[in-house]
Amino acid sequence: MVQADTHHRYHVVCRECRTEKVFESAAAAESFTRRHAEATEHIVVYEPIE
Ligand SMILES: [Zn+2]
């Protein structure tokens, strides 16, 4: 199924180090968030950018 919000980009920010990235899809942002959290045990959040 294709999501309708393909216009959004997603801003990923780690609360515990200076990691910060922008992704073109929620799936990519979520994947990076999970991998960084698993690798470092940091708290990472992402949010859509209008
Ligand atoms: Zn981090």
Image: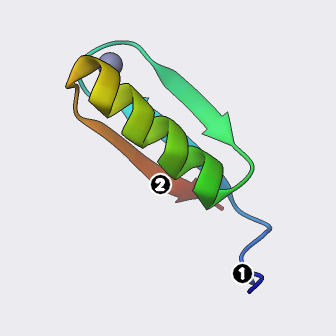
The structure residue drawn at horizontal position 22% and vertical position 34%, both measured from the top left corner, is: 43
Marked residue nearer the N-terminal end (2 or 1): 1
Which numbered tag is attached to residue 47?
2
The structure residue drawn at horizontal position 75% and vertical position 49%, both measured from the top left corner, is: 24
Quadrant including the N terminus? bottom right
Residue 2, percent across and down? 77, 82
Number of marks in the rendered image: 2
The answer to whether the beta carbon of the residue marked 2 is less than 8 Å from any atom of ligand 1 is no
> Type of residue at label 2?
Glu
Q: Give the SS element for disc 1.
A: loop
Q: Give the SS element for disc 2.
A: strand
Q: Which residue is mark 1?
A: 3
Q: Tell which tag, 2 or 1, sits nearer the viewer.
A: 1
Q: Residues within 10 Å of mark 2 (few under 14, many from 20)?
A: some
Left or right: residue 34 versus residue 38 is right
Q: Nearer the viewer, residue 36 or 20?
A: 36
Q: Please tell me whether residue 50 is drawn above or below residue 31 in the rendered image.
A: below
Quadrant including the C terminus? bottom right
The structure residue drawn at horizontal position 79% and vertical position 67%, both measured from the top left corner, is: 7
> Type of residue at label 1?
Gln
